[in-house]
Image (spheres, rainbow, N blue to C red):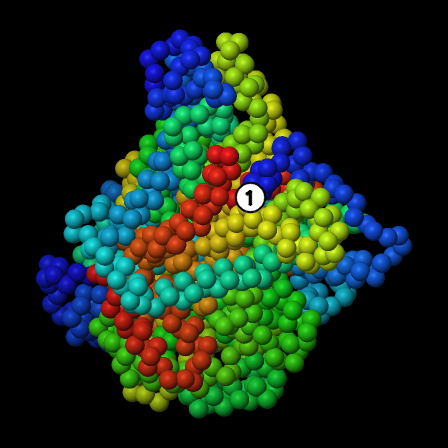
Amino acid sequence: MARTTSISPAAPAPEAGELVATGRGRYHVLTRYDRRVLALMVGIPLLLDVVLIWWPTFSSIFLSLTNWDGVGDVTPQNFIGLKNYQFLLSGGYFQFWPAVAHNFIWLAWLTFIATPLGIFFAVLLDRDMRGSRIYQSVFYLPVVLSLVVVGFIWELQFGPTEGFINNAFGLVKSGHIIDWLGNPRINLFAVLVAASWRHVGYMMVIYLAGLKSVDPTLREAAKVDGANEVQTFFRVVFPVMAPINTVIVVLTTIESLRAFDLAFIINQGKNGLELLSILITNNSISESTRVGFGSAIAVILLVISLGPIIAFLSQAMRTVRS
Amino acid sequence: MDESREDEFPRRPDRRITVPHTGVDLPLDLDLTRRDILKIAGYGSLAAFIAACGGSNPTTSTSVTATGGKMSLGSYQSDSVPKKALADLVTAFQSANGGTKVTVNTVDHGTFQNQITSYLQGTPEDVFTWFSGHRMRFFASKGLATPIDDVWNAVKSNYTEGFANSVKGDDGHVYAVPTSYYPWAVFYRKDVFAQHNYTVPTNWDDFKALCAKMKTDGLIPIAFADKDGWPAMGTFDILNLRLNGYDFHVGLCTGQQKWTDPKVTSVFKKWAEITPYYSPAFAGLTWQQAADQLLRKQAGMYLLGLFVSQEFLASGSAADLGQLDFFPFPHVGSPYDAEEALDAPIDVYMVTKKSPSLSSDTGQAKAFMEYIAKGSVQTQYFVESPGAIPTANDADQSKYDPLTKKAADIVSKAKKITQFFDRDSRPDFAGPNGMQQFLLKYLANPTSDTMSLQTSMQSFWDSLGPE
Amino acid sequence: MSAIASGTAPSDRAALRPAHLPRRAGKGIRPGRVILHAFLIAMTALWVFPLFWAVYSSLRPISDTVKNGYVSWPAGGLSLDNYRTFWTEADLPYFYANTLVIVVPSVILILLLASMVAFACTQFSWRFNVTVLMIFTAGNLLPPQVIIVPLYHIYLSTPIPSFTELDVGRFAFPFFSDNNLLYDQYIGIMLIHVVFQTGFATFVLSNYMKTISKEITESAIMDGAHVLRIWWNIVLPLCRPALAAMATLLFTFIYNDFFWALILLKTGDKRPITSALNNLQGEFFSNNNLIAAGALLAAVPPILIYIFLQKQFIAGLTLGSTKG
């Protein structure tokens, strides 16, 4: 903080940490009172954020080096170095690699099926046509629903003996029941259908907003050049939408890594629905009490998440800086 | 358990106990080395479950209890029927104990169990509902439960020695008061059996023949549901007990025996003979849905605990309940058939350690523990919420319906009793990402070679740290 | 986010206005349009169906569906009995109250804190302002499971005073903690929502505030106004649309959460409706018809918000789109 409170139009560039109102070439040095207020405005939320989010994050890294069972204090005897990681990565924990695979199937499904479908809906609805608003409303209705509710609603569709699908197609009567929720080869995809129900609308809303801000003259120009709608979209609109495309990819990735609720609600994330987030919970906040081990899985999830988080930040901060 | 600490707990000298009213001597300590086994054996070797051996009046001691004041109770009895019964019990206790104000925190079964470790370490209530077996001793040895030897001294004359052993921790102290138990058996509807002229099978071949017959009659021979993961353990337990005997089963639960043992393979082989008769899509069904199949005469039989009767009441009528009957799991032709072993889990109440209010409420909590040990209290609870049998000697058996009488009888005839896999084994092995998952994996393809599965079960066990 | 990323001003928030140029070329019905509508109608039908099915199941008595199966005409008639059963037996109003007590203060606090940070970071330039924004944004993007174990222990070891309790019938709200801890308290759940979502709201609001001309702040300072005044009297009113959008969105986020409450509350009676609902499944629920009724009852508040505040809701998503 600068010690002066005088307003000096000719002041040099501010010192480190100095709070000054920005103006083109003019710097108004704030009063000490104002600086303190601003410091508090940033400091209190920042302190909370650091204490309740970042401190636990780093604690997780520490705990992952222990075999702590969650009871009592962590003692030096609990420290076991990288053993948890060795064990996980060497396939010692039979659930780990399946969970990683499921997270990536989740990601692939959302990236190649749900997100493109959302984009497709957005492109279709981004035109002056009757009923566009109604279509939009329907597609994003699931976005407001809790995943618990989404899970219940889809269990009503997928239930093996009482669900809509098996009954409507006569599979229950004919005895050819498909176990949508219990067969480990297909239940992940049943859950992904439910997840997509929500994800498609979400992506559509975001993309639609982006499309509406594309300069219309670009499209007109493409049209004049004889491009059809598909060509116009891929050659003109899509490239202009680059920032939004990044955001969408990042959001899809983060959603996939965070996936938890649906699988947890359906069968507590076992039998084909293992996910990293669920393994963390089932190992460290359950009767199992393998806190150190669960934390190692948490750290692996953290490391994987850092990729999209950094991608998002660099995209977002580019716009903040601009 | 840490092996090095083993020495601190030398084995107690060989003890034998007598099954009440029978004069039969049973070894209390089996010839196994680990403490865990001793404990399970201590309870399990008893046919001493007979609640019928009353006669002695409980001596009540007021030295450790207090009236008035307040206390709190953490309960997993979230289903509406037992919840109401417990609420009535609490009300009765309040007036019987000088107006003690009791706060009850009800959390659903699944969540309560999942979060028990954090619950007990956090700010638990003074008293909580729990299970006996390894699951009780585990938390006792972690120092998360308060020993209640004084309470037990006041009420022990109202319990058989089998129950007495079921509530002892590794350190020899008493940590719980047992309040009810129930057997696992094969349930069926009498009217369905009568209609098709089925007879109760007593051996494996008859059992399979009955399954085949039911199938041709258009029934699901065996209702089965494993979406929740734990119900399949009941079948594993009983097959292992029948084929390989009690000692092997307990050894397996506690790590003394290997999962790669051919005996385990034989269980899976035997099991595969009846899996074709299971409910279709069982991995996506809850136990209530499978119970409904039995209730609605879609299925012929169902291996489950006595609590299946609750679903008959909830979704059916009293008439449906009247049709419910059961038979013990059939003999399989092994030497261990004679053990007549079965799962008969005991539900208990325990006193926590870290309850913030415990220091002021200890007397009231202990008064509550003594209160629920009374036969009259347990009987009243049973009348309101049937599905489990009272444990106290002086419980009024004239209030039992025929099904309950039969259930008490089958347990008393069993020479070996286990709790249930997830109560007899360590929780990190038995949980959703352990045993539950292994059994689901097996059930997805029961006829395939199970050795690789058994290998991964064993390596998972080996990977678990000291308990 | 998107609107900002594509450089539009807050005034023409894309989703809030109709499509830009009419591109309808010819008159009359074009076959392309017919196919388009047919496709969209088919897709919307597909989208609505699961919800419709839940409504239909919830209106049928269990006896009817047991007898005739779920895919059948309502021989037993339709009724609200399942809703009535669920409402009374599951003690639903009580859980709604829990939710309300958590959501409303949380949303207000988040908006206050986030707008302060966004204000300080965008209206003034100082060395670490972008870093601070990144700390908040990144924190919001972390999977909650990564922090849950240490957070749980922090909650167990943070002392919180208890002064008094607000009793309204069966419902009691402690000020601030009835066990002197953060754990198992309404304020504990509020706090983690506030901290987690402040990251998101800060990011969105700072994007929005960035578009406000800094000269407003500047001249106010020249006129001798204190920063607190500028924030409260000048910048916040300018941000009203963004704040409304955020409030709507945050309400649904927090309403719909079930993870934090699942882990950080031990008392069943303190659970907000979404977590309570999950707990009731398989316990109280004995059949699909009741499950459907329960799920729909829990979904009513967010759906109402969506219907009446659709604009704000969508604007919130498109402004921020770091969360869903």
Q: Is residue B358 visible?
A: yes
Number of numbered discs: 1
Q: Nearer the viewer, residue C308 or A206?
A: A206
Q: In the rendered view, tell whether residue C180 sits above or below residue C220.
A: below
Using the rendered view, name the quadrant where residue B362 is placed: top left
Q: Where is residue B299 in the image (x, y as percent from the top left)?
A: 57, 77
Residue for point 54% across, 82% down: B221
Residue for point 74% across, 42% down: C20
Q: In the rendered view, tell whether residue B448 sits above or below residue A39.
A: below
Residue extending furthest right?
C28
Q: Which of C132 and B243 is in front in this view?
A: C132
Q: Position of residue B398 (x, y in %)?
A: 45, 64
Residue for point 59% across, 41% down: C6
Q: Where is residue B201 in the image (x, y as percent from the top left)?
A: 46, 86
Report whether B267 appears left or right of A259: left
Q: Nearer the viewer, residue B175 or B437?
A: B437
Q: Mark 1 = which residue?
A: C321
Q: Can residue C290 be seen in this view?
A: no
Report whether B26 appears left or right of B210: left
Amino acid type, mark 1: Ser
Q: In the rendered view, tell whether residue C180 sits above or below residue A38.
A: below
Q: Where is residue A62 in the image (x, y as percent from the top left)?
A: 26, 47
Using the rendered view, name the quadrant where residue C52 is placed: bottom right
Callout 1: few (<14), some (14-19), or many (20+) C-alpha neighbours within 10 Å?
Answer: many
Q: In which quarter of the image is the C terminus of chain B?
A: bottom left
